[in-house]
Image: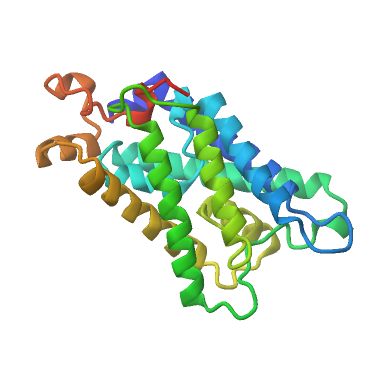
Amino acid sequence: MWELRSASFWRAISAEFFATLFYVFFGLGASLRWAPGPLHILQVALAFGLALATLVQAVGHISGAHVNPAVTFAFLVGSQMSLLRAFCYMAAQLLGAVAGAAVLYSVTPTAVRGNLALNTLHPGVSVGQATIVEIFLTLQFVLCIFATYDERRNGRLGSVALAVGFSLTLGHLFGMYYTGAGMNPARSFAPAILTRNFTNHWVYWVGPIIGAGLGSLLYDFLLFPRLKSVSERLSILKGARPSDSNGQPEGTGEPVELKTQAL
């Protein structure tokens, strides 16, 4: 529980709250229909991608800029953060998302609000198909995050923020046609709360969580394994102090991405 007494811990929680607030506010805002006609998929995809890229650049060095409960779950599966931190991150993300959607709701004309860009399945897409799509969308997204955030990579090329933003944009360019491209349970949860519409809402939790977990296992245990013992992993999950990790830089209980700084 030492993390609860750490100022950096609470700064990270605050960063996740405000980052998710901004992400939902700008992402959902760009997805509203202000004029008759079809929604421009490219506009929505770029809005979400640029919003996330901006936030990774802004708060990545503070909290890792997860901005997504599924991403936090992926880091938890990879034993890269403590259970306590993961729980607090997810709570902050959900509260931030609802706050962002509430602000958007309050500043948007009634005629434009609609369902507040609620994620819905495309007609003809079954819940099973939608879940598989969400799994694959989040899987590629988490793989990109793990690869770009990985402090073990030498001579990383390009911008971490842009790489993550483009990965999210790619997911939206494909997924918008199937499920509205959830990829983030907090993003899907916020408009569902405000519109009180939870039809097929479970898809936007189960799909991203499974996809994120698979992405973490694929990268951290198969593609680029982290050579940590079971005891080291348990120590991180329990939130051991940095001094308790016997000199191992990965056994601090801090999210690994906080130590990269190369955003």
> Which quadrant: the N terminus?
top left
Which color mode does the image show? rainbow
Q: Quadrant of residue 214?
A: bottom left
- Side (left or right) of 146 relative to 141: left
Residue 247 location, x and y as percent?
14, 19
Asked whether, in this view, residue 96 is left or right of residue 75, the answer is right
Q: Is residue 24 visible?
A: no
Q: Is residue 169 left or right of residue 73?
A: right
Is residue 2 something that shows in the picture?
yes
Q: Kindly indicate the quadrant of the structure image that contains residue 34.
A: bottom right
The residue lying at 20 percent from left, 37 percent from top is 226
- Please provide percent x and percent y for residue 258: 38, 25
Identified at 55% across, 41% down, the residue is 166
Name the image quarter holding residue 198: bottom right
Percent of width and height locating residue 35: 89, 57
Position above or below: 13 against 117: above
State the residue in front, 171 or 182: 171
